[in-house]
Amino acid sequence: MFTVLRIRRDLVDAIVAHARRDHPDEACGVIAGPDDGSDRPERFIPMVNAARSPTFYEFDSGDLLKLYREMAANDETPVVIYHSHTATEAYPSRTDIKLAQEPFAHYVLVSTRDADEHEFRSYRIVDGVVTEEPVEVVESYMFANTGSDDVPDA
Amino acid sequence: MAVTVSIPTILRTHTGGEKSVEASGKTVLEVIDDIEARHGGLKARLVKDEKLHRFVNVYVNDEDVRFAGGLDAEVKDGDTVTILPAVAGGAR
């Protein structure tokens, strides 16, 4: 399955800002979007890292329940699940792969190991298999190109 | 004793795609066993060495059962049991 993460610039900026703010601990959160197959990340939800650790993250269990209830009430799904690596590259660790349990989410990793430059990468993690996907940053979803580029307009 | 059990996306392959199922039981373990009897394979995803898997959260109504007796946590008629995989990971 070929996939791409198409995401608004302000949401990318919000994820990176959260990762910088919590550095050297790992930051984590979700971007929810409509549960209609549109695969469109919209609502930025930074989460507390209950582990407060530079090498591990976990959503607090009470916050997790609240988050999933809220998403269910809004007909939303976790389109993006993000976290930061603060001393290593933005690639899923063995722990990330083992614990990934949302087969339809884009797993975004941000590395803050460099103070000036960050890495921002996205993956699918399904049944222990990691597939990196391109990230397409857009200013807005409004003027989306809904067709394929290689089909000429009639 | 009928309770509603909310099933997360990743486990819906075990419930024929259903987001929630009805079950009966007086404890979380009995509820899991009751579902297992109809939807084989679910229990192994939730229980390991007779304990709740470390990275699966189970709630009775608003309470995480980890703080309420684990698999022995009491379930009453009309309760909602919610299963949610932990969202966790990290460089370690």
Image (spheres, coloured by chain):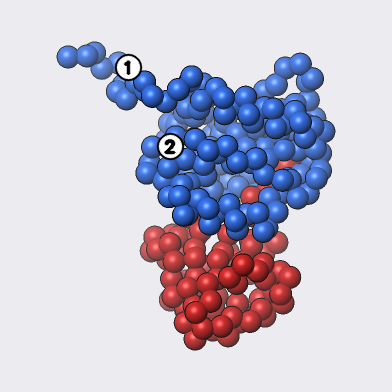
Chain colours: A blue, B red
Q: Which mark is residue A44?
A: none
Residue in the image at 38% along x and 24% along y: A142
Q: Would residue A10 be seen by someone viewing this image from the given angle?
A: yes
Chain letter belonging to callout 2: A
Residue in the image at 38% along x and 37% along y: A38
Q: Amino acid at mark 2?
A: Asp
Q: Looking at the image, tell me whether mark 2 or mark 1 is earlier in sequence order.
A: 2
Q: Residues within 10 Å of mark 1 (few under 14, many from 20)?
A: few
Position in image of residue A12 (x %, y %): 59, 26
- The Cα–Cα distance between marks 2 and 1, rounded to whole angstroms, is 19 Å
Look at discs 2 and 1 and give the one toward the viewer.
2
Position in image of residue B46 (x %, y %): 60, 66
Q: Circle 2 sits on which residue?
A: A39
The secondary structure type at the circle numbered 1 is: loop
Q: Amino acid at mark 1?
A: Asp
Q: Which mark is residue A149?
A: 1
Residue in the image at 61% along x and 67% along y: B62
Task: Check if mark 2 and mark 1 are on a common chain.
Answer: yes
Q: Would residue B92 be seen by someone viewing this image from the given angle?
A: no
Chain letter belonging to callout 1: A
